[in-house]
Image: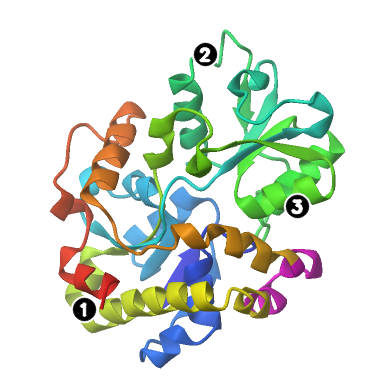
Amino acid sequence: MKIAVPDLITNSYFPAIAAVELGFCQAEGLDLTLEHLFPVPQAMAALRDGQLDFVAGSAHATLTAFPGWQGAKLLTALAQGMYWLLVLRSDLAATRGDVNAVRGLRIGAAAGVDLGLRGLLAAAGIDLARDDVRIGPVPGTGQPGVSFGVTAAKALEEGSIDGFWANAMGAETAVRRGVGTIILDVRRGDGPPAARDYTFAALVTTDRTIARAPEAVAAAVRAIVQTQRALKAQPERATEVGKRLFPPAEAAMIADVVTRDLPFYDPAIAAQAVSRMNQFAQDMGLLTGPVPYEQVVATRFRQLWTS
């Protein structure tokens, strides 16, 4: 079976990556191959077309390939809350939490991911046209195998963008190089409070896969839960994964980034989180109306979140 992540050199989907690389999937009898497929809407389209069995990605992006939540289900949360950070050039001297600092700037964001930033800025009173905020792709991220966050940090350093909206690995890279400053981390209280629940990292599959291979799906959920617990107990194991998959600089920092994320490693998907995400999806034009929790989440597997 195949699982795709829209970014490989990242903390965002790390429990899924580590579940494969640390042997937790194999221990559950699941032979799972890890693939990198960017951006997240493309990964969801491949899932819809039967090219993949699972996607570890942003929960709301499922709607880009499965309108109205028809045909796909969320299986478990990889981590809680919207996990992207806003980073601006350090020479702008912007302060933490100052949303207005984006005025007149070029901000890099991936397709699908950019909706979180657009929604956040709108909630904060920023009008993209009036305030001359240009949100678009980061140069160089369209090539196969490229990490968005790490490439965004490089583009920031080169001056081709003024800021980026990306994962904490990209943010950490920019900060350590001295070229970027973290302005917003909504999971930790920055920006409009509602933005925290716009989306979250989730394991997604299709109704077709659940019907065809329910035991394999259950094994995937168990593997994610066990991986989250293992990383909480020994976060330094993240370095083992990093050394296998990441360039040396990113491999050296992944354990630090994962350690900061540990409070969010909860596999449960709350009804309130789904309701708030769906409201965001409606605001962004991805959903036309409310959808029941059971249509979004594969509830038959939720007992595995705590077993």
Return the residue nearer the eye: 93 or 169. 93
Label 1 vs label 2, nearer the camera: 2
| Residue 127 marker | 2
Q: Distance between the residues labelled 1 and 2?
A: 46 Å
Residue 108: % across, % down: 65, 35
Mark 1 or 3, nearer chain start: 3
| Observer able to see residue 10 | no
- Considering the whole magenta stretch, tell me its main secondary structure: helix
| Residue 214 marker | 1
Q: In this view, does 197 lie above or below 236?
A: above
User: What are the residue bounds of the magenta stretch?
Assistant: 241-252
Q: In this view, does 15 lie above or below 121?
A: below
Q: In which quarter of the image is residue 47?
A: bottom left
Q: What residue sits right under mark 3 in the picture? A: 173
Q: How crowded is mark 2: few (under 14 residues within 10 Å), some or many (20 or more)?
A: some
The quadrant of the image that shows the N terminus is bottom left
